[in-house]
Each structure stands twice: as C-alpha cells, then as structure tokens.
Amino acid sequence: MAKPLKCDVCSEPATVHLTQIINNQIHKIDLCESCAEQKGITDPSGYSLADLLVKPESQSAPEVAALSCPECGCTQREFKKTGRLGCGACYETFASVVNPALLNMHKGDSHKGKVPQRALERATFIDRLGTLEDGLKEAISSERYEDAARMRDEIIELKKAMEAAALED
C-alpha cells in the first residue's frame, strides 16, 4: 500500500495537492487542510509557489529575512515575490529555504544532468582515439614498433567504427 503523502510545511497528512507549471517545469506541493487555508490556497486572488516555499518574514529569523545574494543582490523578499532566484550563487545563499523545498519536490537537491547515449559513445570514441594516438607517438619515439603497429591497427578500427556510427545518425 502506498505511503500517505505528508504536508510539505508541517508533516501532517496532506489532503491538498497542487501542481503549478512554471517555465515548462512541473512543481508539486502537498499540503494539509490547515496549511492550505493559512497559505490562502482557497483565496480566488491566487497564490505563488514561492509563497509556499518561503516563510513570511515574521516567521523567519531576522537574519534570514535580511539575506541577499553577494553575487547578484537578489533578496529573499524578491525570491518570494517572483519565485525566481537571480543566479547560481543564490542557491547557496538561500539554501536553508530552497534545499528543504527541493528535497520535497525532487529526488535530491542537486541536478546531476543527463548525457545522451550517442554523445557519450562519441566522447568515449574520441577519448580512446586520443589515448591511442598519444601511445602511438610514444611507442614510435621509444622504438617499440610492435606496440606501435598494434596501436595503429586499433586506431584504424576505431576510426572505421566512428564512421559507421556517424552514418547511422
């Protein structure tokens, strides 16, 4: 049986589930009835996901409310108003606010990215080719001709495989 979702604010069982699409990205928030009412979710004037992520200044420690990014000058108030951070350094500056929210919305608090399989294969080919060519030059300069011939043959085969892969694209 699935584990019931907990409120992102207070950890009570969530009964209100919100989905907001910002810049083609889906953001989900789960709230209990009480927190949803406190956040004004039922208010027809609307709400912002940033309002849910950033506690009002009256509930935050004064030093957190006064935070501003040393790189771009973005303040917590601006983040709350727009729902956007100014630069990459903002993630460190506002980590105490952003990281718990990210952990609740995503599998982690850092983006690891993805590499397309073909790009990964191409990079592997290129790396191997560079290693072989360096090894070939070193084998020739140290007069290890049998090793050099083996590396030359491997380079030829690798280039053929790269050409075949390029034709498939």
Image (cartoon, grey):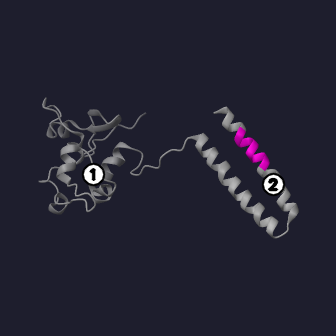
Q: Quadrant of the N terminus?
A: top left
**Magenta span contains residue 158:** yes
Residue located 65% across and 49% down the image: 124
How far apart marks 1 and 2 lie (CA) works out to: 52 Å
Overall secondary structure of the magenta section: helix
**Magenta span contains residue 77:** no
Q: Are marks 1 and 2 in contact (CB under 8 Å)?
A: no
Secondary element under disc 1, as helix, strand or loop, is: loop
Tell me which amino acid carries mark 2: Arg
Secondary element under disc 2, as helix, strand or loop, is: helix
Mark number for residue 86? 1
Segment tinted magenta in the rendering = 156-163
Q: Percent from the top left, x then y, of residue 163?
A: 71, 40
Quarter assignment of residue 41: top left
Mark nearer the N terminus (1 vs 2): 1
Question: Is 120 displayed left or right of 143 in the figure?
Answer: left
Tell me which amino acid carries mark 1: Gly
Q: Percent from the top left, x then y, of residue 118?
A: 61, 40
Q: Pick whichever, 167 or 76, lies toward us.
A: 167
Q: Percent from the top left, x then y, of residue 28?
A: 32, 37
Which residue, given by chain and number where applicable, does mark 2 sit on? 152
Question: Is 51 displayed left or right of 150 in the figure?
Answer: left
Q: Quadrant of the C terminus?
A: top right
Question: Is 161 displayed left or right of 144 in the figure?
Answer: left
Q: Pick whichever, 62 or 35, lies toward us.
A: 62
Residue located 34% across and 54% down the image: 88
Residue that lies at the very extreme toward the right in this rendered image? 146
Q: Percent from the top left, x then y, of residue 30?
A: 28, 38
Q: Pick whichever, 106 or 154, lies toward us.
A: 154
Question: In front of the other: label 1 or label 2?
Answer: 2
Q: Is residue 149 above or below residue 30?
A: below
Residue located 34% across and 47% down the image: 102
